[in-house]
Image (cartoon, helix red, strand yellow):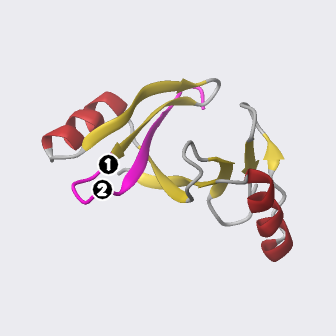
Amino acid sequence: MPFINYVEFNSGDVEASTKFYEDVFDWNPQPWGAEDYFVAGHGEEPGIDTGFTTSEDGQPITVATITVDDLEGYMGRVIFAGGEIVVPKFTIPGVGHACYFTDTTGMILGVHQPDAAT
């Protein structure tokens, strides 16, 4: 069954955002992959790993990502149900593939299919 496995905080100021969550929750976001991208992992502790990045338009947005076993199949289901793929399938090196969609109310979410080795 698909499940939420990741949440991403997009803001106009990624440095201020990561500092806030460090100060409040003692999270330790570390640089990962692309410039201006940080991940606060929880290791063996309960919780969902959290990504921090700069939003394209500077507006804050939180995006939950749902893990599935057939990304393209779920992309088709999104479209059939009236949603829209807003960021087409892309590769996350060493992790898998993902896309972003909006539902029929305009909420944006991600869908992720892990690589077979992950």
Residue sticking out furthest to the bottom: 24
Q: Secondary structure at mark 2?
A: loop
**Residue 116 in view:** no
Residue drawn 85% across the image and 72% down it: 23
Q: Disc 1 to disc 2, how far (Cα)?
A: 5 Å
Q: In this orientation, which residue lies closer to the viewer: 40 or 107? A: 107
Left or right? Give the position of 65 relative to 41: left
Q: In this orientation, which residue lies closer to the viewer: 92 or 58? A: 58
Residue drawn 60% across the image and 32% down it: 118
Residue 116 on the magenta segment: yes
Q: Are marks 1 and 2 in contact (CB under 8 Å)?
A: yes
Q: Which residue is mark 2?
A: 106
- The residue type indicated by label 1 comes to Thr
Tell me where the magenta segment starts and ends, as one range. 102-118
Left or right? Give the position of 20 relative to 8: right
Residue drawn 79% across the image and 68% down it: 20
Q: Which residue is mark 1?
A: 102
Q: Position of residue 106 (x, y in %)?
A: 30, 56
Q: Position of residue 43 (x, y in %)?
A: 76, 55
Residue drawn 47% across the image and 56% down it: 4
Q: In this orientation, which residue lies closer to the viewer: 98 or 108? A: 108
Q: In this orientation, which residue lies closer to the viewer: 80 or 14? A: 14
